[in-house]
Amino acid sequence: TKKILKGKQVLMYCTGGIRCERASALLRTKIEHEEDTKQLGIKGVYQLQGGIDKYFREFPEGGWWKGKNYVFDKRFAHAPPVVENLERQQKSGEVLGKCGACHKPWDRYRGKKRCPTCGVPLLICKECHNADKQKTKKIDKNVKCDLCVKEGITSKRELRDKEKKEMAAYEKMLREKYGFKEINPKKSSSTGIHSSVTNKPMKKAKIVPNPNKITRLFIKNLNIREIDQPQLCELVEGITHIEWILDRNTKQWYGAVFVEVSTPENAAKAVGSIHKQKVYGRVVHCSFNKPDPKSIWPPPNTKI
């Protein structure tokens, strides 16, 4: 990003002109106080008053604007009125986006598909969406957003580690510049255990009664942006199978799982240690869940 900004004038814009005010103020502050940003020689920082929404009203044919603007509502994106009118008449215009699966020109968000690593919405064309729905061509985890592909991000954990390293480097720079003292993380108490998943002390692991020797657990209210298979296996010891429960309408995972563990003792330990504990900002519920004798458990495609 810094290479792109070097020697340039910067124009900030957003949909309604609010977020760009904060972003432009931040960049001006960094230019004023941070030497590496100052050395970029940025010639000025400006913002589009009223945002793209106002710009489209003043220039209904688009002016200097190209493409569509992403919005955080059910429209997902909007364009200048003249362009949207052409779409309603099913007349093709310039398409800047592309389908994340087949790479054909496409600029409509549909099917609620998201990047499996960073979680941003994906552009998936009608044909690929229908093929995935009909299970003739699966949209797998290799279909990611352009930025994750460009930066080589392959998992949620890798993205978290990257963000943590960048934040740690920035905080170190601020400490060296302004003399801030580093706050040491709280040490685990003698009665608690430390979890690298929650990054804070958890209650001491205890084995709760499990008289029926159940090895299947139901866990809900997990953080969908943070928890993946490695994180879940770190949270619960001895997992052999995971069934990610999907929403019936969206077909997306919503934070609940059935897991099979290797022994009844591991199941009892999991319930005793993580039930009603906060993990990544959410209070997790974990309980024994005896399989229905009429169903097949564990399903063959859930083994890890």
Image (cartoon, helix red, strand yellow):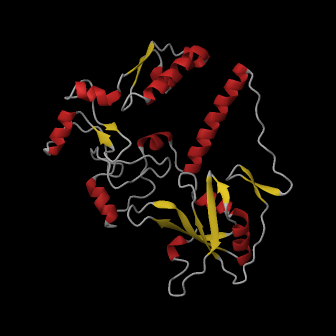
- Tell me which corner region of the image, top left, top right, bottom left or bottom right, holds residue 242: bottom right
- Pinpoint residue 196: horizontal percent, then vertical percent: 70, 52
Quarter containing the C terminus: bottom right
- Residue furthest toward the bottom? 294
Q: Look at the picture and state if 294 lies above or below 27.
A: below
- Tell me which corner region of the image, top left, top right, bottom left or bottom right, holds residue 289: bottom right
Q: Look at the picture and state if 190 lies above or below 274.
A: above
Identify the residue shown where x is 46% and y is 65%: 246
Q: Look at the picture and state if 16 lies above or below 161.
A: above
Q: Nearer the viewer, residue 282 or 91?
A: 282
- Tell me which corner region of the image, top left, top right, bottom left or bottom right, holds residue 172: top right
Instruction: Give left or right: position of 215 versus 17.
Output: right
- Pinpoint residue 121: horizontal percent, then vertical percent: 40, 47
- Pinpoint residue 131: horizontal percent, then vertical percent: 30, 62
Identify the residue shown where x is 36% and y is 22%: 49
How many marks are shown on the rendered structure?
0
Identify the residue shown where x is 25% and y is 39%: 95
Instruction: Give left or right: position of 51 versus 170.
Output: left
- Pinpoint residue 208: horizontal percent, then vertical percent: 75, 73
Instruction: Give left or right: position of 19 versus 15.
Output: right
